[in-house]
C-alpha cells in the first residue's frame, strides 16, 4: 500500500520538514494542546527500554522523542530523512547518534534492534508497507515495534469536532506559531487520509508482525499500535 502522499514527492516532504525544524517541537505542543508530551510518555512506557537495549527511533526529527529511551540507559539511534531536523537535533543533543535514513531502505543490518518505534511519521512515508517490512527486518527475533500515530476518534460526535479542528483551526494556529504554516495544512490533510486503527493493524500483520494490538489515546485522536517479531 502507498499512503496518500497528497501530491508531494519524498524530497518535497523532506524539504518541508527541513523548513519547520527550528520550531517543530513548540508548534506540536501548541497544536496538540499539550497532549504531545503525554503521548511521548505513553510511547516510552510501551517500548519499555532498559539498559543494554538497542532502540531505533524512526522519524525522530530533532530527537526529542529519543530522550526518554536514552534516559533508561538504553542505546537509542534517532533516525530521520530530514537533514534539517537532524541538524537541529544535533545542536540540542550532540551526544546522540542521529542518523539519516529512508524508512523504506533503512541503513541497518538485519535483526539489530530490540525495539523499533516511530511516532507521527509513518503516514509521511510514501510506501507504508515497505516501511513496516523494513522495521521488521531490522528487529531481532522476539523484538517489538511500537507505532504512535494519529487515528480516528472512536466517538462519532467528537470525531466531527476533531475533523473541524484539523481543517479550520489548525491552519490559523500554525500560521501564528510556525515558520511554514503550509506544512501543517499538508499534515492536517495527511491525518484525515490515514487508515483507522483496524486498518493499520492489518498492515502490520501483512508485514509479518504478530501479536498485533492497539490502544487508543485521547479518545482515539492517537492510537498506539504494537507488534512482535517471532
Image (tube, rainbow, N blue to C red):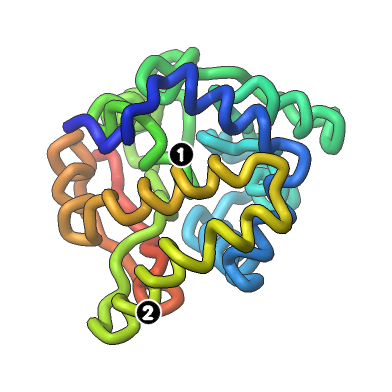
The residue drawn where x is 31% and y is 55% is: 192
Tell me: residue 120, above or below residue 112: below
Counting from the top left corner in percent of width and height, residue 91 is at: 86, 30
Question: As drawn, is 156 to the left or to the right of 75?
Answer: left
Quarter holding the N terminus is top left
Find residue 125 and report its image quarter. top left
Q: Position of residue 131 (x, y in %)?
A: 33, 29
**Viewport quadrant of the C terminus:** top left
Is residue 13 toward the left or the right of residue 181 in the image? Answer: left
Q: Where residue 37 appears, x then y in whole percent?
A: 65, 65
Q: Which residue position holds label 1?
A: 116
Q: What number is the disc on residue 161?
A: 2
Instruction: Please identify the quarter of the rendering in which residue 95 is found.
Output: top right
Q: Nearer the viewer, mark 1 or mark 2?
A: 2
Residue 57 appears in the figure? yes
Find residue 217 and report its horizontal and vertical position in percent.
Answer: 43, 72
Tags 1 and 2 touching, CB below 8 Å: no
- Between discs 1 and 2, the one toward the N terminus: 1
Q: Is residue 121 above or below residue 221?
A: above
Amino acid at each position: 500500500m502507498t499512503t496518500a502522499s497528497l501530491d508531494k514527492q519524498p524530497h518535497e516532504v523532506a524539504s518541508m520538514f527541513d523548513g519547520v525544524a527550528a520550531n517543530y517541537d513548540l508548534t506540536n505542543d501548541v497544536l496538540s494542546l499539550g497532549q504531545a508530551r503525554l503521548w511521548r510518555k505513553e510511547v516510552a512506557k510501551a517500548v519499555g527500554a532498559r539498559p543494554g537495549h538497542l532502540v531505533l527511533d524512526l522519524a525522530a526529527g530533532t530527537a526529542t522523542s529519543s530522550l526518554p529511551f536514552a534516559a533508561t540507559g538504553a542505546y537509542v539511534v534517532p533516525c530521520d530523512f530530514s537533514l534539517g531536523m537532524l541538524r537541529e537535533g544535533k545542536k540540542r543533543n550532540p551526544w546522540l547518534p542521529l542518523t539519516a535514513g529512508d524508512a523504506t531502505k533503512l541503513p541497518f543490518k538485519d535483526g539489530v534492534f530490540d525495539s523499533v518505534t516511530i511516532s507521527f511519521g509513518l503516514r509521511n512515508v510514501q510506501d507504508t508497507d515497505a516501511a513496516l517490512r523494513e522495521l521488521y527486518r531490522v528487529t531481532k527475533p522476539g523484538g517489538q515495534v511500537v507505532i504512535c500515530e494519529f487515528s480516528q476518534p472512536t466517538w462519532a460526535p467528537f470525531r466531527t469536532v476533531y475533523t473541524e479542528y484539523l481543517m479550520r483551526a489548525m491552519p490559523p494556529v500554525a500560521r501564528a506559531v510556525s515558520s511554514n504554516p503550509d506544512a501543517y495544512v499538508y499534515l492536517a490533510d495527511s491525518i484525515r487520509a490515514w487508515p483507522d486503527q483496524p486498518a493499520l493493524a492489518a498492515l502490520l500483520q501483512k508485514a509479518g508482525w504478530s501479536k498485533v494490538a492497539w490502544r487508543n489515546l485521547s479518545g482515539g485522536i492517537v492510537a498506539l499500535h504494537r507488534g512482535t517479531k517471532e
